[in-house]
Amino acid sequence: MELGEILKIGGLAGVVSAFFGALFKEASEWMERRRKARFLALKLSVLLEEYFRACTDRLSDIEIYVSSHGQAGEIIVGLPDFPELPSDTAAAWLYLKPDVADAILGLPIEIRLLDDGIRFNTDMDGGPDVNPDWTLEPLCKVALETLDLAKRTRRLHWLKRLTRTSDTEQWVCEARDKLALKHARRDARSIEI
């Protein structure tokens, strides 16, 4: 074997080695990005589920207050404060699915705007005792949107499916449907008059 042939084989081996080395490095970096994204997605889905629970607690308090004619429960105006988003994993936000990141980052702004509207309408209407629906309607909407976003976050990032909130979700849907029926009846009565 001549020196030229040895160098050709050595050069080819070097190229192949560099290719597989780069491929291995890229694969390990991809796995690390995926792991970070899944961890952030888990943190965010738990945070969203906790906010859903805060909304259902408030919904329960208001419904108890209304059904007991003010003897129990509590009338609370507005939406619960949205918890602070995790900042310790700032780089991992880049690896989340873009539509999930966009929806989660926009949620606190949407909640603040809805809350401002609730407070304004309640003040203009004469206070929370006059019409608790100003809080109830957006509360049901935000609760269900938050839970849907938590489920979508879990699904898109290959996390275990959420099952512990299904009964509560059904209860919020029923509350939302009762409000819609109540408004439809009220609107029908106002048309008849």
Image: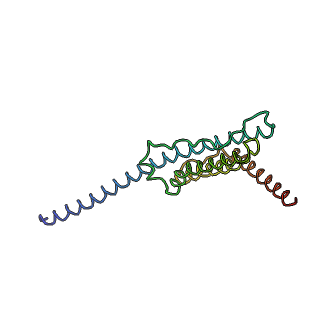
Q: Quadrant of residue 52?
A: top right
Q: Residue at x 78, y 40 (%)?
A: 66
The C terminus lies in quadrant: bottom right
* 15 in relation to 121, above or below: below
Judging depth in this view, the residue of 117 and 163 nearest the camera is 117
Point out residue 112 in the picture as x, y percentages from the top left corner: 58, 48
Could you tell me residue 128's position as x and y percent? 72, 42
Residue occupying the point 54% across, 48% down:
159
Q: Is residue 22 left or right of residue 173?
A: left
Taking the image as shown, residue 94 lies to the left or right of residue 149, namely left
Estimate the x, y position of residue 160 in percent, counting from the top left.
Answer: 57, 47
Looking at the rendered image, the quarter that the N terminus falls into is bottom left
| Front position in the image: 114 or 101 | 114
Figure check: 98 above or below 167 = below
**Residue 6 figure quarter:** bottom left
**Residue 155 vs residue 133: left or right?**
left
Image x and y of residue 140, in percent: 69, 48
In the displayed orientation, state which residue is furthest to the right. 193
